[in-house]
Image (cartoon, rainbow, N blue to C red):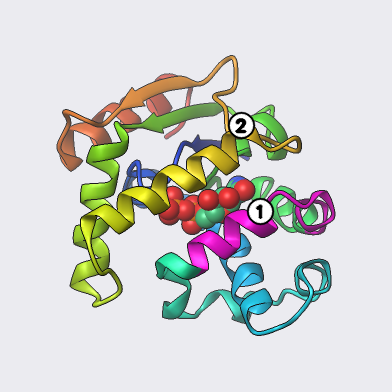
Amino acid sequence: MFCVAIDGPAAAGKGTISRAVAQHFGFAHLDTGLLYRAVGAKTMAGVPAIKAALALMPGDLDNPDLRGPEVAQAASKVAVIPEVRAALVDFQRAFARRSGGAVMDGRDIGTVICPRAEAKLFVTASAEVRAKRRFQELAAKGLANSLDEVLVDVKARDDRDMNRAEAPLRPADDAVLIDTSELNIQEAVDMAIHVVTERGAG
Ligand code: CDP
């Protein structure tokens, strides 16, 4: 078992880095944001948040609509509810302990879900850089209106995620910080692989 915990604010590059690290070491990858997005999407359809979290099925995660900005806001709203977070813990911890190794990205992996993870990264970048990247990503899928709207969305979620009482977004004491503001994808990925290698993977 080897768990790589990758946390950080919205659109910092966690997904890209996590997928590349998982591929490099042959580990499985779980984007834990998708769990909260799937619960958020259900609340948009009228299901109460806690009920939705308790009834979540793996198939609920295979939905391209979960990537949109409205679902992102709904996700960060349900993510403040302690019972919602509690309902998602067992699934995430079981994933962290899988035998082939795991990379998990989110907000509280290194602090709450997998505090004894073998490697912890905290990936960040300036809000402007993150908004620009997310805007380009969403625009390519026809999901974003303007850069300004994406920036407002990202800042609102960061604020909610950092200031909630339960599992707030913050780096674990033993996390390695990677600021991707001035890095291209390859540089950020190389840095992450280097850290994970040093912690004994592969
Ligand atoms: O992709 P992006 O970084 O924009 O967001 P995400 O990782 O898909 O997460 C969506 C929302 O879910 C976040 O804004 C958090 O409120 C919540 N979340 C969380 O609370 N804990 C996690 N481990 C992962 C996501």
Q: Is residue 71 visible?
A: yes
Q: Residues within 10 Å of mark 1 (few under 14, many from 20)?
A: some
Q: Nearer the viewer, residue 48 or 121?
A: 48
Mark 2 neighbour density, 10 Å: few (under 14) some (14–19) many (20 or more): many
Residue 1 badge: none
Closer to viewer: mark 1 or mark 2: 2
**Image location of residue 36, percent across then percent down:** 62, 61
Q: Is residue 141 placed above or below 183 in the rendered structure?
A: below
Q: Residue furthest top?
A: 173
User: Would you name the residue on which mark 1 appears?
Assistant: 95
- Report the front residue among 133 and 116: 133
* Rendered-image quadrant of the N terminus: top right
Residue 147 sits in which quadrant?
Answer: bottom left
Q: Nearer the viewer, residue 132 or 18?
A: 132
Q: Looking at the picture, how far across and down is residue 17, in whole percent? A: 33, 44
Q: Nearer the viewer, residue 158 or 86?
A: 158
- If you read the primary sequence from the N terminus, does the residue marked by circle 1 or circle 2 appear first? 1
| Label ID, residue 110 | 2
Residue at x 50% of width, y 37% of height: 7
Q: Magenta span: helix, strand or loop, mainly?
A: helix
Magenta segment includes 86? yes
Q: Secondary structure at mark 1?
A: helix
